[in-house]
């Protein structure tokens, strides 16, 4: 599933490129934007929570025509646990409902490539902190816990200028972070000992130039 989604994304990105001249010269030094997308999971995470969706706020600072600094704040929502017996056994609370989400903050470079008059392709790499959060609802009370992990993300995208200060984009990003293989780690415990998470996100977004 993850491989098919990545292949489809790559094909879509290639087909989305239209011939014309570079937009980098018209872009402002600072930009802010937002993306919404679908996240494909793998391994035990997919078995216990399934796929999810994400929302990302991002800010970019132009260092040069081709290089930018990218700062992201994102949330990945996976929803309720699919294997409902597992969280009951771990928490010893009958019929408890558990929901997993990842919050992350990352910083890294973007390399942009002009693809035409209105189009720009780019590649990004980010290093950040990923917070694994679990919200539990027993029907009587709700409570949550979280763990923090260092992680990486890398992506490819195509941006198209649609107005003087506005651009729209298609983005594909891979997220990865390490977890501890012990019972004190929320992710490892509540996924039944799944491998380190690898998520593939395909998202649509909009960017505003701060002129």
Image (spheres, grey):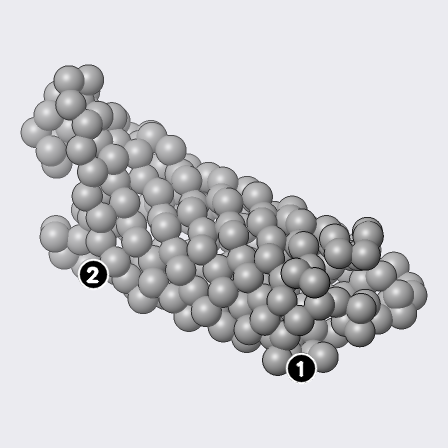
183 sits to left or right of 105: left
Q: Earlier in the sequence, mark 1 or mark 2?
A: 1
Do callouts 1 and 2 mark residues in contact (Cβ within 8 Å)?
Answer: no
Residue 152 in sight here: no
- Residue 133 placement (x, y as % from top left): 27, 45
- Residue 84 placement (x, y as % from top left): 25, 27
* Residue receiving disc 1: 64
Q: Counting other residues with Cα less than 10 Å from the Cα at mark 2, is it few (<14), some (14-19), or many (20 or more)?
A: some
> Quarter holding the C terminus?
bottom right
134 or 10: nearer the viewer:
134
Between the C-alphas of marks 1 and 2, the distance is: 39 Å
Query: What is the secondary structure assignment of the residue under circle 1?
Result: loop
Q: How many marks?
A: 2
- Residue pushed farthest bottom? 64
- Residue pushed farthest front? 211
Residue in view at x 80 percent, y 68 percent: 26
Report the disc number at residue 180. 2
- Residue 38 placement (x, y as % from top left): 55, 42
Residue in view at x 66 percent, y 71 percent: 29
- Residue pushed farthest right? 20
Report the disc number at residue 210. none
147 sits to left or right of 170: left
Query: What is the secondary structure assignment of the residue under circle 2?
Result: loop
Please state which of the two labelled residues, at mark 1 or mark 2, is closer to the viewer: 1
Residue 63 in sight here: yes
């Amino acid at each position: 599933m993850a491989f098919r989604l990545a292949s489809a994304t790559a094909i879509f990105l290639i087909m989305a490129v239209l011939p014309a001249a570079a937009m980098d010269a018209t872009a402002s030094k600072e930009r802010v934007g937002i993306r919404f997308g679908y996240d494909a999971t793998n391994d035990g995470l997919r078995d216990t929570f399934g796929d999810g969706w994400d929302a990302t706020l991002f800010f970019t600072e132009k260092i040069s025509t081709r290089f930018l600094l990218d700062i992201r704040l994102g949330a990945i929502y996976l929803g309720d646990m699919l294997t409902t017996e597992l969280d009951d056994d771990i928490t010893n609370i009958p019929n408890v409902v558990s929901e997993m989400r990842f919050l992350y903050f990352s910083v890294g470079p973007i390399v942009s490539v002009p693809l035409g008059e209105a189009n720009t392709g780019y590649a990004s790499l980010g290093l950040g902190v990923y917070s694994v959060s679990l919200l539990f609802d027993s029907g009587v009370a709700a409570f949550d816990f979280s763990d923090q992990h260092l992680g990486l993300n890398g992506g490819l995208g195509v941006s198209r200028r649609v107005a003087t200060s506005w651009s729209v984009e298609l983005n594909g990003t891979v997220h990865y972070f390490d977890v501890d293989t012990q019972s004190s780690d929320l992710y490892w415990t509540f996924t039944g000992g799944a491998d380190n998470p690898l998520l593939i996100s395909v998202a649509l977004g909009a960017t505003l130039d701060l002129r």
